[in-house]
Image: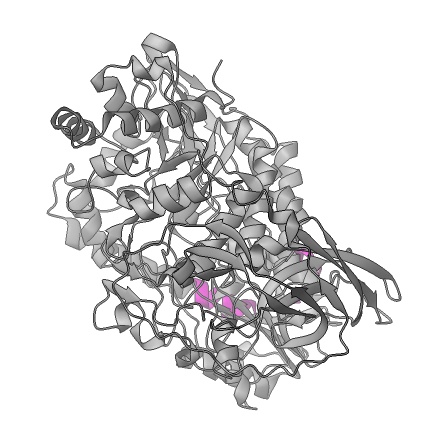
Amino acid sequence: MKDFIVVSPNNDEESQLEKENRLLSRQVAEEGFVLLYNNGVLPLQERTVALFGTGARMTVFGGTGSGETKGRQKVTIEQGLKNAGVKIESSLWIDEFDEKYKRKRKAWKDDVEEHIRGYHLWNVMDMFREIDKHHFVFPVGDEICEKHVKEECDVAIYIVARQAGEGGDRKLEEGDYFLSRTEVDSISFLKKHYKKVVVLINSGGSVDCSFMDREETKPDALLYIGQPGEEAGNAVADILLGNESPSGRLTATWAKDYYDFPGADEYGFLGENSKEANFKEGIYVGYRWFHANHIEPRFAFGYGMSYTTFEHCYLDVKQKGTKLVFRICVKNTGAVYSGKDVVEIYVRKPSADIYQVMKELAGYGKTKKLNPGEEEILEIEVSLKDLVTYQADMHGEYLLSGEYVFFEGTSADNLNAITIAVVQQACLLKKVEPLNSCKVKFDEKIFENSFIENRELPLLEIDTSVFDSYISEHQSEGVIPSNRVLNLTDEELCTMLVGGSVVSYGYVRTPGTVGRTSNILWKKHKLPSINMADGPAGLNLTPQSLITKGGMEKSYLHLPENWSYGFLPKMEWIAVGNPKRDRMICQFTTAFPSTTVRTQTWNRELIYKVGDAVGREMKKYGITLWLAPAINIQKNPLCGRNFEYASEDPLLSGYMAASIIDGVQHLGGVGVTIKHFCANNQETEREYMSSNIGERALREIYLKGFEIAIRESNPWSLMTSYNKLNGTYTANHNELLMNVLRKEWGYSGVVMTDWGAITKGKGDYYQCANNGNDLIMPGDGSAVKQLLNDLKTGRLNRKAAQISVERILRLVMKSDYVG
């Protein structure tokens, strides 16, 4: 019998924690929905509606891949409306679509079975590759005709649904980024037959909304619900019926034309070479690009509507240490609905002889729910550390001398200048080592700034003496290997650098975990391995499973989805356990809204509660590291993993990540892994492509969110990305990991690879520890064998390996399951 611990309970009744987290998931979804257009039809007064579109009964709750979440019960939009007492008059269409989907799914499955018929049982990987070639296409609607329409119903709701996930980018074609012909025709049909038409977009990212430009297809309201998690239907009903007023704001720009985005025609599969991504736009990403090129977006960054109206009144700003604190009074000026409002603060930094963006986000805040006539004074902090400009010729990050013009408003395109802060003399905040690896030349432009300075604006002189001690604040403390590490054998040392086996001793048994550290030190030092779980929208664990006495994990009652092809059901005994003999354990975790939807709340206090909720589930099920949050920039709307990412803006991404990190780690014994470090901005050829970025854009856009999260919340670990950065795999990248992460930022936590990122033909094992990447995941014996050889030949630096193992052991010792 193996020496392992099973933490998860065998009680399948809904726990109090599940109930609490379900309510939280619903609140987050409601605050994360963005009302994009409304001519007055919302909130609905009617309680009878016609419901159409793929997402009605097949609501997209979250993405696929590592971002997938299970959940005990997921509420579809159809069910949510019914729960709210709404009568659905379109059941015939929904039932017909459901049957068509089932037939299409069966035909696809039969085709897969035919193509894998000749594979031997143990050729699992080859078989799955064949399955992947014949992937199932997510349906995007079905024709609506006269028989589906009932005259006594005035309101039609149409749901545009899209699925996306890890391993592939979205397509620039109908049925994905563009609406299909069926979807456009359906909206047109509904416009002719119903007095009110509401369109919901149930997608991980933006879609083309050119249908809004034609009267025959322009709906009366447009609501973006993203991927809303397990309480999707109930949350949608609350917003549509006016139980809650929408308060979400976009975290990425929606363009009128896809080709308005920078580098649109070269993105991923659209370019001549999908393995070379040249970020030619530099720092001009998202709204920065649209401002600089005077392009009007469809919906601006930070935009969102409400059922009520608000009035903002700027009061004053004061400097408190290294922060500016702005006071803004917000009043609900509506007469009927309560609601929350978001205040956004932007800054225009001085240009001097260096190009700057017109405006960039500097701070933000969200009110409590304000009743009609009620007001609240928000205090919004802006860190002066976030206002630095990188100057390559001086190898440093400077608070430049000159005037910093601050704006306040409700989106990047709806701002009013409120004050000017003055820096008399440039201040060096951080001396840095230059990143010399980028060989691509970028156009550095100074765009004309359309803002006309108003000398009547109040002035504030910045006291830069507060930074006297800041320059040395981020120097690495260094890690000194303990005697325990110095006394390890070569085999123990190299094995600890590699992820642990799932069938060995000294570990916590949690079905569904994707990896763990090695347990080679269990017998000698009683140091177990620790579990890691996927899921940026919540813990991605197996809801129900069986554990044999020997520790083998088996399915409960039915085969896993991936086993249900061809001859595999005949081998059911391998995968399915016996409830009478084996131990059943239950791990119903919460499927929270996707990272994008959470960030669209612009509510740090609420996101802290999400972190706390996930952390409590981690403690309940034996998870030490949550492989989240992801902080990559939403550079292009076609990225398949945009739903896992927060925003096109690094400051918003960094601070929202810090909130969820604090929520998890304040509990003690559990921690997070921020990812993917860095510039993982496309899924096409992600394991072989190189993100080629100039140093200033790298520091001010693609690294800034990570720096903020580390500075504010010190996450336990960090995951490098699949891609190369300027030609070098990130897990082997000395400048990135040693100069920036370790020395400049002083980060001493564990750095791990993404799963299978470093293997034969993709980087070098020995270069990981040599360059600051401590742990190779998920790990296998061949990696250990190669590291042992590299240690003997001197390619693997022994001291570097010892430092990496010391970091890993310090992490393990912080776990709940040690001691």
The N terminus: image quadrant:
top left
What span is in magenta?
Answer: 80-98
Left or right: 336 in relation to 531: right
Q: Position of residue 181 (x, y in %)?
A: 40, 81
Q: Residue at x 68, y 79 (%)?
A: 152
Q: Position of residue 299 (x, y in %)?
A: 56, 76
Q: Nearer the viewer, residue 452 or 467?
A: 467
What colouring style does the render use? one colour
Q: Position of residue 600 (x, y in %)?
A: 59, 60
Residue 546, compared with residue 591, is above or below; it is: above
Residue 93 painted magenta = yes
- Can residue 557 be seen here? The reply is yes
As drawn, which residue projects farthest toward the top? 524
Residue 338, compared with residue 471, is above or below; it is: below
Q: How many dots with numbers? A: 0
Q: Nearer the viewer, residue 458 or 741?
A: 458
Q: Nearer the viewer, residue 648 or 431?
A: 431
Q: Residue at x 53, y 49 (%)?
A: 708
- Picture quadrant where residue 11 is located: top right
As drawn, which residue projects farthest toward the bottom? 215
- Picture quadrant where residue 652 is located: bottom right
- Can residue 633 be seen here? The reply is no
Magenta region, main secondary structure: helix
